Image (cartoon, rainbow, N blue to C red):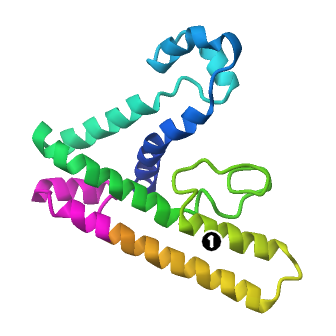
Amino acid sequence: MLRRYILPAFFAAAIAAPAVMAQEQPRGNDNANNGDRNRGGDQNRGGDQNRGRGNFDPAQFRQRMIDDIKEQMGATDDEMKVIQPKLEKVFTAQMEARAGGGFGGFRGRGGPGGGGGGNTFPGSDSAVAKASEALRTTLENKSASADEITAKLTALREARKAARANLETAQKDLKDVLSARQEAVLVARGMLE
């Protein structure tokens, strides 16, 4: 059951990581070693770990995930040209549908999803994550009225409903291009229902 949620989360993180990583520009003399680190080499590993990134290469991780899925499904290169964009839409829709309940939920102040730090997880800018954050902020206000709380709760429920509908559409679009074996592999991996 845990694998059902973890693998899509890692894949979605790999999809979103280039945008997040682009915000973290190297400083000073780090530019000289940046090329080696981005190619997955072990050079100057300590410098990257000090910034909390280790030697993680999101592009390599993403490619390994796609290669693994392709191999398990027995898909050809031509099939993957059609499947991959639809698969990525499912991953994104899954992360948006789950935002606010896992990564962006009620966390301590200053951490991911908390009041003091930015949430950089995939789906953190989705309508569900924003509605969840609005509800959390309202609940932190001990003098919030029942009407305010009800309005934020309704907004969160509506956002979740829309996200689930978007996920169902993305999953249907993906299923439409899959063989029976490919569909079964993705159901087993928790990407399809």
Question: In the image, residue 20 lies at what x, y percent?
Answer: 56, 39
The image quadrant of residue 31 is: top right
Question: In the image, residue 27 lies at what x, y percent?
Answer: 69, 19
Question: In the image, residue 84 lies at what x, y percent?
Answer: 25, 47
Residue beneath the point at 55% across and 33% down: 22
Which residue position holds label 1?
Answer: 131
Q: Is residue 102 left or right of residue 148?
A: left
**Callout 1 crowding tier (Cα within 10 Å): few <14, some 14–19, many ≥20:** many
Residue beneath the point at 48% across and 44% down: 16
The residue lying furthest to the bottom in this view is 147
Question: In the image, residue 174 lies at what x, y percent?
Answer: 23, 60
Majority secondary structure of the magenta segment? helix
Q: Is residue 85 left or right of residue 162?
A: left
Who is closer to the viewer here, 13 or 188? 13
User: Is 11 inside the magenta-drawn segment?
Assistant: no
Residue beneath the point at 74% across and 56% down: 114
Q: Secondary structure at mark 1?
A: helix
User: Is 188 inside the magenta-drawn segment?
Assistant: yes
Relative to 29, does residue 82 appear above or below in the rendering?
below
Can residue 113 be seen at all in this image of the molecule?
A: yes
Give the mark count: 1
- Which image quarter holds the C terminus? bottom left
Q: Is residue 45 left or right of residue 106?
A: left
Relative to 144, does residue 100 appear above or below in the rendering?
above
Residues drawn in magenta: 169-193
Q: Amino acid at mark 1?
A: Ala
Relative to 149, does residue 165 appear above or below in the rendering?
above
